[in-house]
């Protein structure tokens, strides 16, 4: 049966990162007794289980923290993208398609940011070099 003395020795051994010699210098026990206790009470398994629980707790905290941060980042990116689309769309409505290179860039960047925030693939084509048909279709989509 594991006693309070055994348990105290376990915690010393565990906190000393399972270092046998350091444990002997901190705990009043003979070398053969400590070796027997480690084996008899399966301290390596117990220590492994404790390590696994600590790792699981730490992982959950990291996931929770990063999950919230990621959700906030995605929401902000979506808003920034929508704002750029609105700026580009307003410019295109006022000035027309043929004079709006910066507006078209704003729309493209806005769409890319929104698509990325939603986890969708972004269009790899440069809309400014794909002709008036694409620009007209984009303008119609923005104006609607």
Image (spheres, grey):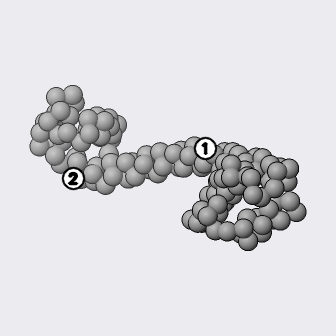
Q: Is residue 76 left or right of residue 92?
A: left
Q: Secondary structure at mark 2?
A: helix
Horizontal and vertical percent for residue 101? 68, 52
Question: Residue beneath label 2, please?
Answer: 39
Q: Nearer the viewer, residue 123 or 23?
A: 123
121 versus 62 height, above or below: below
Q: Residues within 10 Å of mark 1 (few under 14, many from 20)?
A: few
Question: Residue beneath label 1, please?
Answer: 69
Asked if the residue under mark 2 is in contact with the one under mark 1, i.e. CB atoms within 8 Å, the reply is no
4 versus 81 height, above or below: above
Q: Residue furthest bottom?
A: 133
Horizontal and vertical percent for residue 33? 16, 42
Q: Quadrant of residue 132?
A: bottom right
Instruction: State which tag comes first along the sequence, 1 or 2.
Output: 2
Q: Residue furthest right?
A: 144
Give the label on residue 20, or none: none
34 versus 108 height, above or below: above
Q: Is any part of residue 64 visible from this angle?
A: no
Q: Nearer the viewer, residue 122 or 137?
A: 137
Report the residue at 78% width, 66% height from top: 136
Q: Nearer the viewer, residue 125 or 39?
A: 125
The mark lying in front, picked from 1 and 2, is 1
Report the residue at 74% width, 53% height from top: 99
Q: Quadrant of the C terminus?
A: bottom right
């Amino acid at each position: 049966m594991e006693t309070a003395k055994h348990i105290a020795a376990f915690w010393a051994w565990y906190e000393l990162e399972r270092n046998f010699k350091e444990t002997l210098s901190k705990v009043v026990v003979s070398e053969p007794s400590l070796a027997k206790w480690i084996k008899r009470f399966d301290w390596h398994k117990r220590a492994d289980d404790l390590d696994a629980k600590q790792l699981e707790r730490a992982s959950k905290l990291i996931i929770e923290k990063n999950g919230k941060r990621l959700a906030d980042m995605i929401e902000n990116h979506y808003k920034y993208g929508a704002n750029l689309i609105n700026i580009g769309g307003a410019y295109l409505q006022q000035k027309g398609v043929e004079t709006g290179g910066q507006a078209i860039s704003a729309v493209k960047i806005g769409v890319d940011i929104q698509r990325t925030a939603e986890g969708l693939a972004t269009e790899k084509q440069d809309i400014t070099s794909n002709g008036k048909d694409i620009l007209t279709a984009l303008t119609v989509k923005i104006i609607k």
